[in-house]
């Protein structure tokens, strides 16, 4: 049986068996990836360039878009390359780096989603104190804490996972390097330390989830007491997208990491991994901009400015026109 010192590469789960399906998956993943890049890029640019969007809520949305870009760029390019070139290999170092960055972006995103629920709680339940509690310094500190927490959490998980001896081969039953799948390759005794770490992490996730739920219970109670229907509509329009993203993210991530072994199969694992690693980064821009007029206006300005610059560029001018 090979050990971790003799493993130079891992073999990832192929997305399809036939060449036609492989090419179909490649173009599908490419479309999703380009849509995620475009959507998150437009939101980031709109928030950075539009002064009307220089508020705490949109500052956190900018950070969320950057984390989504990092998350989807960690998994999809390698999966597309393997699908296009009909290979399954990823180097040992590449697998460790992919796991580190994926856990980093995912954990930082969840921390940021928790902070965003607090931002909505203060904005709706304590509007008179919003300017004091959510000033620029406090927002920068919270965002830095989310990124820093994600980095430390990922560093500990990656070091713990890849310090385990691997005795069960090098075949990872997933399209990217994922902690539960790497643990399946570990020796039956040595992986207990990482399992305990995973359960400790799950308790922290549960605590954040409880915080989000309590925040939204108070938010909805405050919204229902609002006398103005327009005020209730505006409050719901800023809260429901965030709640939808949190629900999708948590339900799939928790199931992927805590599902019983009897419910595990390569196809189910693949579907769940796509749901929590690909769908949220690609759909978050649509969810957050669908009912937000300010974001729509900001994105429209960015697109209009880009088009006008392209038209005015000399290389795009046609001689004689």
Image (tube, rainbow, N blue to C red):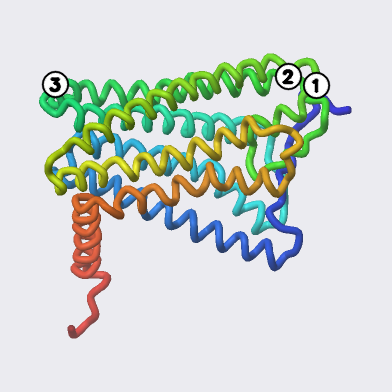
Identify the mark at residue 11; answer none if there is no mark: none
Residue that label 1 marks: 187
Residue that label 3 marks: 132
**Sequence-earlier tag: 3 or 1:** 3
Residue 158 shown left or right of residue 181 in the figure: left
* Front: mark 3 or 2: 3
Residue 294 shown left or right of residue 196 in the figure: left
**Residue pictured at 13% horizontal, 26% vertical:** 131
Count numbered badges in the picture.
3
Is 126 or 168 nearer to us in this picture? 126
Identify the mark at residue 191; answer none if there is no mark: 2
Residue 61 shown left or right of residue 85 in the figure: left
Against 62, is 20 above or below? Answer: below
For mark 3, give the secondary structure.
helix
Q: Distance between the residues labelled 3 and 1?
A: 53 Å
Please state the horizontal and vertical placement of residue 264, each as a whole percent of the image: 72, 39
Please state the horizontal and vertical placement of residue 191, each as a whole percent of the image: 73, 19
The quadrant of the picture occupied by the N terminus is: top right
**Residue pictured at 18% horizontal, 83% vertical:** 321
């Amino acid at each position: 049986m090979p050990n971790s010192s003799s493993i130079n590469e891992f073999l990832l789960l192929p997305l399809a068996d036939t060449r036609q399906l492989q090419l179909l998956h490649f173009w599908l993943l490419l479309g999703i990836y380009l849509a995620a890049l475009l959507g998150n890029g437009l939101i980031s640019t709109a928030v950075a360039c539009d002064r009307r969007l220089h508020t705490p809520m949109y500052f956190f949305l900018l950070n969320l878009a950057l984390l989504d870009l990092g998350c989807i760029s960690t998994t999809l390019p390698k999966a597309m390359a393997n699908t296009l070139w009909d290979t399954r290999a990823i180097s040992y170092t590449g697998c460790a780096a992919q796991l580190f960055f994926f856990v980093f972006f995912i954990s930082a995103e969840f921390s940021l989603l928790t902070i965003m629920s607090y931002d909505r709680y203060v904005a709706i339940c304590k509007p008179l104190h919003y300017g004091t509690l959510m000033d620029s310094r406090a927002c920068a500190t919270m965002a830095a804490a989310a990124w820093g927490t994600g980095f430390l959490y990922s560093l500990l998980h990656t070091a713990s996972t890849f310090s385990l001896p691997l005795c069960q081969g090098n075949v990872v039953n997933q399209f990217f390097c994922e902690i539960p799948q790497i643990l399946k390759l570990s020796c039956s005794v040595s992986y207990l330390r990482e399992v305990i770490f995973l359960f400790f992490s799950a308790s922290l996730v549960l605590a954040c989830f409880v915080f989000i739920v309590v925040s939204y219970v108070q938010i909805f109670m405050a919204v229902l007491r609002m006398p103005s229907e327009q005020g209730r509509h505006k409050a719901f329009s800023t809260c429901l997208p965030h709640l939808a993203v949190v629900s999708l993210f948590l339900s799939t991530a928790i199931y992927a990491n805590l599902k019983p072994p009897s419910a595990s199969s390569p196809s189910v694992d693949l579907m769940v991994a796509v749901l929590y690693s690909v769908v949220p980064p690609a759909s978050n821009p649509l969810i957050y901009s669908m009912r937000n007029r300010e974001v729509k206006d900001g994105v429209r300005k960015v697109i209009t400015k880009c088009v006008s610059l392209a038209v005015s560029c000399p290389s795009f001018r046609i001689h004689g026109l």
